[in-house]
Amino acid sequence: MNIIPSLKLAGFALIFFVVVYAPAFATVAVLRPSVQVTIPLIIIVSAGLAALVMALRAGGTKGIGEFGIAMSPAPYVLAATLAGVLVGGALAYAAALYPATSPLDVSHLRPWMIFVYFVLAAPVQEEFIFRGLLQTTMARPVSAPGSFWGAHFPVVFVAALFGAIHLDSGLVVAAGAVLLGLIAGELRRMSGSLVPAILFHALLNAASALWPAS
């Protein structure tokens, strides 16, 4: 895979990114619901559209499994658990040292809402979109995935995009999001499943949610 086709695939990934997110944010902009409604609305609408796009694009013998909707080999689940605990603790500590302002006021959310929205739902939604739809879109045409560029450029590009959308929370959060994306992307690439990526993502979010406030 050379640079020009890779950039074209990156363009397609950006189009799908807009397709799945724009309707959700447009709905929020029009309705202006409370934060208790805004978060699940964005999660449900964007994840639903991502699932629809994946279903429409699924083909061949793998079907929807091509997008990582499949079981994972156990070693990758164990690796995701270990990495999630270690990296999650490190990033939660860094976030406590350099606190950032969230673009959404979550101070009125109850503890169970924070757990459901950010530890359970958001990792599934974001991994569906980024490592499921977008990363697969970029890696799909690679017939010889052994090449370094073909194997890793989709992971790096999607991780950078994931970091970019977190810039409104500050550079520390955005850098953590890039690191999350790189590790989750490699787990997705190597395992062929979204399960390790979702688990790793959930553990990072849990560490941030559970870390004592300074």
Image: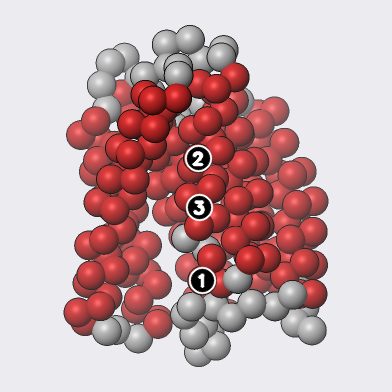
Can residue 190 be seen at all in this image of the molecule?
yes
Q: Residue furthest front?
A: 4
| Crowd band around label 2 with a 10 angstrom C-alpha radius: few (<14), some (14–19), many (20+) | many
Q: Say which residue appears at 51% left-offset and 71% top-offset.
A: 168
Relative to 135, 170 lies left or right: right
Cα distance between the residues tagged 2 and 3? 9 Å
Which residue matches tag 1? 168
Picture quarter with the C terminus: bottom right
Which residue occupies the foreground of this view, 201 or 134? 134
Where residue 24 appears, as percent x and y from the top left, is 27, 65
Residue 4 spot, x, y in % from top left: 39, 25
Residue situated in front as seen by the camera: 138 or 52: 138
Q: Which residue is mark 2?
A: 157
At numbered mark 2, what does the secondary structure look like: helix, strand or loop? helix
Q: Is residue 191 above or below residue 49?
A: above
Q: Which label's residue is closer to the chain start, 1 or 2?
A: 2
Q: Is residue 197 left or right of residue 21?
A: right
Dot 3 crowding, Cα within 10 Å, few <14, some 14–19, many 20+: many
Examine the rendering and report whether any part of residue 198 can be seen. no
* Circle 1 SS class: helix
Q: Is residue 193 above or below residue 151?
A: below
Circles 2, 3 touching at the beta carbon (< 8 Å): no
Determine the residue located farthest toward the bottom in the rendered image: 108
Task: Estimate how packed mark 1 is, as few (under 14), some (14 to 19) or many (20 or more) residues with alpha carbons within 10 Å.
Answer: some
Quarter of the image for residue 73 reads top right
The reply, left or right, for residue 78 in relation to residue 19 is right
Of mark 2 and mark 3, the one earlier in the sequence is: 2
Q: Residue at x 31, y 14 (%)?
A: 61
Q: Who's the residue at 72% across and 36% down the image?
A: 79
Q: What quarter of the picture does the N terminus occupy? A: top left
